[in-house]
Image: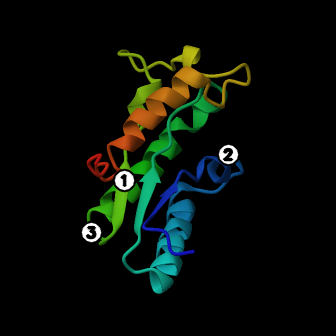
Amino acid sequence: HAPKMVLLRAGGNDIHAGKSAEQVFREYQDFVKTVHAKLPETDIVFISLSPAPARWTERDENKKLNSLVEAYSKTEPHVKYADTYDMTLTADGQARAELFIADKLHFNPEGYKLLAERVRLALPPAPPKQ
């Protein structure tokens, strides 16, 4: 395969398993190098982590990973960042439980709709219809 774009949302389970944001970031950098070694023109879009009620205590580490990836994305060609962190938060910084299924970790349809809207911003415009 030779995709033009790779979209990746990863790191939350690694942080949950005890890895630091810095460890996960280094693994992401390795992933980018591996992809770009064979596909140097392929865009890689990192979809940031968002706080979930089930992993609320991990939100600061998630945000740290997001910040590392966002800064890296500004320095690397063909590396982009889609920010989704705040979409699961209320105006006063609490979790929006209504965006999750019963496990309080995975999105329900409304949560995925918001996620899709954010990710769409990182995609190239659709070609005009003929």
Asked whether the residues under the numbered discs 1 and 3 touch, taking CB atoms below 8 Å apart as contact, a structural biologist would say no
Q: Position of residue 38 (x, y in %)?
A: 49, 84
- Identify the disc placed on residue 75: 3
Q: Which residue is mark 2?
A: 16
Kind of residue sitting beneath label 1: Tyr
Q: Position of residue 90 (x, y in %)?
A: 41, 17
- Label 1 and label 3: CA atoms lie apart by 11 Å
> Which one is earlier in the sequence, the residue at label 1 or at label 3?
3
Q: Residues within 10 Å of mark 2 (few under 14, many from 20)?
A: some
> Residue at horizontal 38%, vertical 37%?
118
Q: Is residue 28 left or right of residue 81?
A: right
Q: Which residue is mark 1?
A: 81
Q: As displayed, is residue 21 above or below residue 63?
A: below
Q: Nearer the viewer, mark 1 or mark 2?
A: 1
> Which one is earlier in the sequence, the residue at label 1 or at label 2?
2
> Residue at horizontal 27%, vertical 69%?
75
Q: Is residue 54 left or right of residue 38?
A: right
For mark 2, give the secondary structure.
helix
